[in-house]
Image (spheres, rainbow, N blue to C red):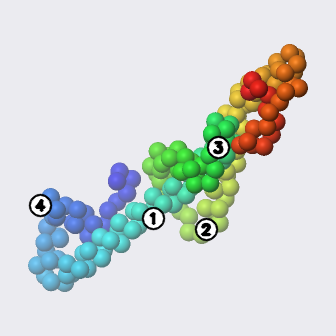
Amino acid sequence: FNSLTLSPALSALLLKGHGHAPASAHAHAADGQHGHGHAKAEALRALTEIGYSYVIALALATPRALAIVMVLPVFTRLGLTGMPRQGAAMALAIPLIPYVQAELLQLDIVTPLPYAALIAKEVAIGLLLGTLFSLPFWAVDIAGGLMDFARGASIGGTIDPSSGEEDPFTG
């Protein structure tokens, strides 16, 4: 929680389990002004806010990774579709959450329109990166096709069941 500030109720609840509850938490309990239920509700609200920021950060980090996974031949040749592809994209996006969250804390976004613009930007960057990362794979594929054509192997092509396209025997 380096970049987040915890509410007093959450910090009191977290520290209470370790025997380090701040004096203000004991004072509130002694006064009877705030019952134990109120402290739990306040802690739950604070945890929800923290979880919400992680969900937003994941939602902004995943589109770039998903666009890369959709374009990169390594993932398309494996036959990843649907949920496995989205899972792979989320697995690539999870390490980025703290960085995205730190950037979000600097921005003051109150309407959904900037989030939509950020997601569109992330998809565009992901498509560009996916295309750049795919170029070496496509170059090798084209070179293999040219070599097959030069030696006459293009006559006996096969149908690739995963893509439905005709592929030469050598790749």
Q: Are marks 4 and 1 in contact (CB under 8 Å)?
A: no
Question: Which comes sooner in the sequence, label 2 or label 1?
Answer: 1
Residue 103 can be seen in this image: no
Height in image: 161 above or below 139? Answer: below
Cα distance between the residues tagged 2 and 1:
14 Å
At x 21%, y 66%, the residue is: 12
Question: In the shown orientation, is residue 95 left or right of residue 63?
Answer: left
Q: Residue at x 17, y 77 (%)?
A: 28
Q: Amino acid at mark 4?
A: Gly
Q: Position of residue 149 (x, y in %)?
A: 87, 21
Q: Quadrant of the C terminus?
A: top right
Disc 1 or disc 3, which is closer to the eye? 3
Q: Which residue is mark 4?
A: 19
Q: CA distance from mark 4 to mark 3?
A: 53 Å
Residue for badge 2: 112
Disc 3 marks which residue?
A: 79
Q: Residues within 10 Å of mark 2 (few under 14, many from 20)?
A: few
The reply to whether the C-beta atoms of the residues labelled 2 and 1 are less than 8 Å apart is no
Please give the residue where the numbered disc 1 appears in the rendered image: 52
Q: Of residues 96 and 7, which is closer to you in this image? A: 96
Q: Label 3: few (<14), some or many (≥20) within 10 Å? A: few
Q: Amino acid at mark 2?
A: Pro
Label 4 vs 1, first from the N-terminus:
4
| Drawn side of residue 40 relative to residue 132, left or right | left
Q: CA separation, marks 4 and 2?
A: 42 Å
Q: Earlier in the sequence, mark 3 or mark 2?
A: 3
Spatial separation of the CA atoms under disc 4 and disc 1: 28 Å
Tag 1 and tag 3, C-beta contact below 8 Å: no
Q: Residues within 10 Å of mark 1 (few under 14, many from 20)?
A: few
Residue 51 is at least partly visible in this image = yes
